[in-house]
Amino acid sequence: MAKAICADKPGGFEVLEWRDIPTPQLSPGEVLIHQTKVGLNFIDVYMTSGTYPFPEDGPQIPGGEAAGIIAQIGEGVDFFAVGDRVAYSTPNGAYREERVLAADKLVKLPAGVSDEVAAAAMLKGMTVEYLLNRSFKVNHNHKVLFHAAAGGVGLIAGQWLKYLGAESIGTVGSDDKISLAKAAGFTHVINYNNANFVDEVQDITNGYGVDVAYDSVGQATYPHTLSCLKRFGLFVSFGQSSGVIKNIAMSDLANNGSLYAQRPTLFNFIDTWESLSEVSGNMFQMIADGHLTMDINQRYPLKDVPIAFRALLERKTTGATVFDIGRD
């Protein structure tokens, strides 16, 4: 038996419980991981709230990224060994001390990447990798709008965009987050609570608009983000921290300049061992080369997930939050 954060019914942080849960037996192709660090993401809140379906055969265990040490190997696994340091990203299930997982969902950690950095980077870092390299291939000629620039994904994106040489415009919700976003590498930062970000973007781009807009906020920023795009620009909606977009219409794309729109998810970009290795490998290389630093600004023991959820929902967090299992 090991402990996990569990929810038996949809709700907020109040439905989360820290309790014992059986560790499944290994099947062929699987490994047992003694987890050391787990990352926090807004999708974990969605999993708990019921935005995504609850499992039919047990409690919902949120958590989408973690790192740990392989403690046991199932039949047929020949590319990992007991004692290997590994990390992963999955839609849910990470908020536990031990986990059984298919070996082809794991990546081996490079020597220079700590468990804590990996737990902060797997979901968020790979999200930035596919957003900037696959959803839209950003280069130094592009102008980019990125909402929630001081969040976990945003601070990674700012650094990556700076490396690519793009002109980047980040938005934040308070003045104290402006310096964080600028330090991460954003060329311009707008506090959308103090200024109309559409007007600011148009002013910065001399009325041209941006080539691509990345939006993880959702309802609060839609459809205004569309007005920031140039003709034939791309709107990438990859989250909904303020709520699911409810009033989207195809005519919005036409009226704002024959725009393109995408609603991507990381797990479509890492659905094979080869694609997972490529995306994670690019991210780890950026870290190794010093182009990316994970800003881990909040740390909690895993049992305190409800406290961390509350801080996240009240927008009191910046950068990444990591939970400690107590096993290093």
Image (cartoon, rainbow, N blue to C red):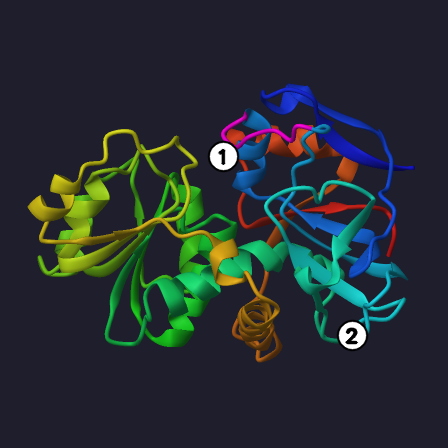
Q: Which residues are magenta?
A: 50-56
Q: Nearer the viewer, residue 78 or 43?
A: 78
- Is 284 left, or right, of 102 in this rendering? left
- Is 285 left, or right, of 225 in this rendering? right
Residue 18 pos. (x, y %): 79, 28
Q: CA distance from mark 2 to mark 1?
A: 41 Å
Residue 299 pos. (x, y %): 70, 45
Q: How many marks?
A: 2
Q: Nearer the viewer, residue 114 or 106?
A: 106
The quadrant the C terminus occupies is bottom right
Q: Nearer the viewer, residue 231 or 9?
A: 9
Question: Main SS of the magenta segment?
Answer: loop
Q: State whether residue 199 appears in this view.
A: no
Residue lying at 24% horizontally and 75% vertically, measured from the top left: 141
Q: Amino acid at mark 2?
A: Phe
Name the residue beneath numbered marker 1: 315
Residue 319 pos. (x, y %): 54, 50
Name the residue beneath numbered marker 2: 79
Q: Is residue 74 magenta?
A: no
Specify which label sits upstream in the sequence, 2 or 1. Answer: 2
